[in-house]
Amino acid sequence: MSRIGKIPIPLPDGVKVAVSGGDVTVDGPKGTLRRTFGGRVKVEVVDRECVVTRVNDERRSRAYHGLARALVNNMVIGVAEGYSKTLKIVGVGYRVLPRGGGLELQVGFSHSVPVPAVDGVEFEVPDASTIVVKGIDKELVGQVAAEIRRVRPPEPYKGKGIRYENEHVRRKSGKAGVGAVR
């Protein structure tokens, strides 16, 4: 039995889970999320708890059990509290500007890089070197944050670039060519 899969998911106040066939819809104060699960698992609501059970003991069903439970749990947390990722921009002259729901990044290129608005994700810019990506879908928030980071990932020599808030960048020493043999 899956250790993660057998743990019931407590439903906070204001969160409703509706199951019809393989579709699971989670409705809460922040919004609604919907996901379709195949015929390998069954989702049920029992006494303000959501229980995920597998239909049979095949290898693929056992593998999918814990994943399905984690996905439903992420949906419940998302509609109740929401998710956010914070990105820091490090570098002289590097900054971010909010532009019509999206962002405009100035990160050392000859041009600014536009980041378009995405449905289900909000951007906050508390200062010129911080981006907060917020939303109810954990997967979408993480994907959008990763795409923003990919514009200019942190480099190991000076540490310049876009990084996650608590990300540690291992620094390399520069050239060590003093006194080298010719």
Image (tube, rainbow, N blue to C red):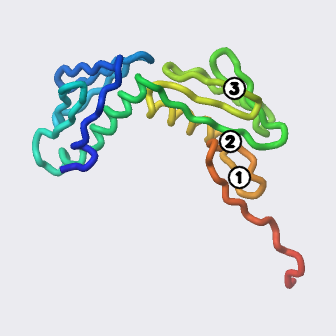
Q: Which residue carries the number 1 mark?
A: 155
Q: Nearer the viewer, residue 179 or 12?
A: 12
In the figure, is residue 181 to the left or right of 107?
right
Asked if the residues shown at circle 1 and circle 3 are in contact, with their CB atoms under 8 angstroms apart, the answer is no
Residue at coordinates 73% horizontally, 63% vertically from top-left?
172
Classify residue 38 by image quadrant: top left
Mark 2: amino acid? Ile
Say whether marks 2 and 1 touch (CB < 8 Å). no
For marks 2 and 3, give the one nearer the viewer. 3
The residue located at (61%, 41%) in the rendering is 150
Q: Quadrant of the C terminus?
A: bottom right
Mark 2 lies on residue: 162
Residue appearing at x 26%, y 24% in the figure: 24
- Sequence-earlier tag: 1 or 3: 3
Tag nearer the camera, 1 or 3: 3
- In the displayed structure, 103 sits above or below 109; it is above
How many residues crowd mark 1 within 10 Å: few (<14), some (14–19), many (20+)?
some
| Amino acid type assigned to the residue bearing label 3 in the image | Val
Q: How far apart, in angstroms, are the residues tagged by discs 2 and 3?
A: 14 Å
What residue do we see at 51% from left, 35% from top? 143
Where does residue 48 sit, x and y in percent of width and height? Answer: 24, 25
- Is disc 3 placed on a helix, strand or loop? loop
Q: Residues within 10 Å of mark 3 (few under 14, many from 20)?
A: some
- From this view, report whether residue 146 is shown above or below residue 29: below
Which is more toward the observer, 3 or 95?
Answer: 3
The relative height of residue 174 versus residue 156 in the rendered view (above or below) is below
Between 171 and 86, the one lying in front of the other is 86
Report, in whole angstroms, how far the alpha carbon at label 2 lies from the one at label 1: 9 Å
User: Sequence-wise, which precedes: disc 2 or disc 3?
Assistant: 3
* Residue labelled with disc 3: 125
